[in-house]
Amino acid sequence: MNRFLLFEALLCFGLTVVAADAEVRDFRTQDGKSVRGEIESYKLQTDKLAIKTEGGKTVQLKADDLVDDDYVYVRDWDSVRLFSQNTHFRMYFNGPESLNKWSKILWRRPPGNVEAQQTYKIDHNRLGYEIKFDNQTGYDLENVELKYNLFYMQERMDYRVEEKVPDIVVRPCLERYAIVPSGKNNKFASKTIVLRRKEIAGAGTKLRYLEGEGRFLKSEMIGAIFRATITTRSGLSTVREIRMPKDLSEEYVWVEPTAENIVWADDSLDEREDVRRPPTLWVELGGSGEGG
């Protein structure tokens, strides 16, 4: 399995869309004065704010001198600006990693005291990413969302034409974070997908072999698209998109996560290895001896 360690500034394609450009508005100070213009710059460490007026002049003041609503707006504007820069808010994606592997054999169980017959075997491989946020913005970032799509290929058998058919499967995912503290490296695991390697079943207990292709239906991880969003109390927001691998084809189209499609049946699979031959139906129902 390929392994990608993503440093967003260097190894991936990143798209940053800033939805909150500097807005022309009235900035009111606590002594009753007002400056109309847009933010030109703000330095959190010194609290120095530069406002470019409609007349083209630059007015400098302390953000702390503003009324509460305008002070919050300035800090929100700056947090969105820094979130959009990978020098201040960096995302790392490690993987895909194999988290668990297990196999199961499906059995045909004739009636009576007849030994179960093996039909086919399925090998499972659960994969996911380790994600890390490195927040060096100086702000405790609130209302951060990470939406992402996990893409993989799973073959199935089309018995009408006796051929394998590759299906592209997309898992939409959504994570919400009430707060991402400043100066912290937050690590967490992504949602997962399960790859299946399945023997091609024929009639009864027979397996099918396709010339040149073997007797297995295969699957493989393709990649992922990650979109990180921040929305402030002032309504400012920005979105960053990262594709893994960086040359992930444009044919893999984004699927917006919804309350319905983020529910994934494979999350509740029984992951215990199960390749043992089951007892006969006769024995399971309490029979003994040669009966059945």
Image (tube, rainbow, N blue to C red):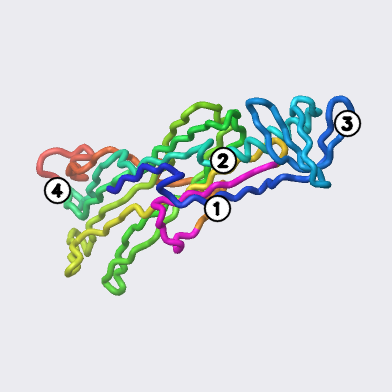
Q: CA distance from mark 1 to mark 3?
A: 45 Å
Identify residue type, mark 1. Glu
Q: Please, what secondary structure does the residue beneath circle 1 have?
A: loop
Instruction: State which mark lies toward you, 3 or 2.
Output: 3
Which residue is tagged 4? 115
Using residue 79 as the reference point, say whether residue 68 is left or right of it.
right
Identify residue type, mark 4. Glu
Q: Earlier in the sequence, mark 1 or mark 4?
A: 4
The correct choice, above or below, for 134 with respect to 174 in the image is above
Q: Are marks 1 and 4 in contact (CB under 8 Å)?
A: no
Q: Please, what secondary structure does the residue beneath circle 3 have?
A: loop
For the point 52% across and 39% down, the residue is 175
Which residue is tagged 3? 33
Q: CA distance from mark 1 to mark 4?
A: 49 Å
Residue 258 spot, x, y in % from top left: 56, 49
Residue 7 spot, x, y in % from top left: 42, 42
- The boundaries of the magenta stretch are 236-253
Instruction: State which mark lies toward you, 1 or 2.
Output: 2
Residue 202 spot, x, y in % from top left: 22, 64
Which residue is tagged 1? 256
Using residue 76 as the reference point, say whether residue 103 is left or right of it.
left
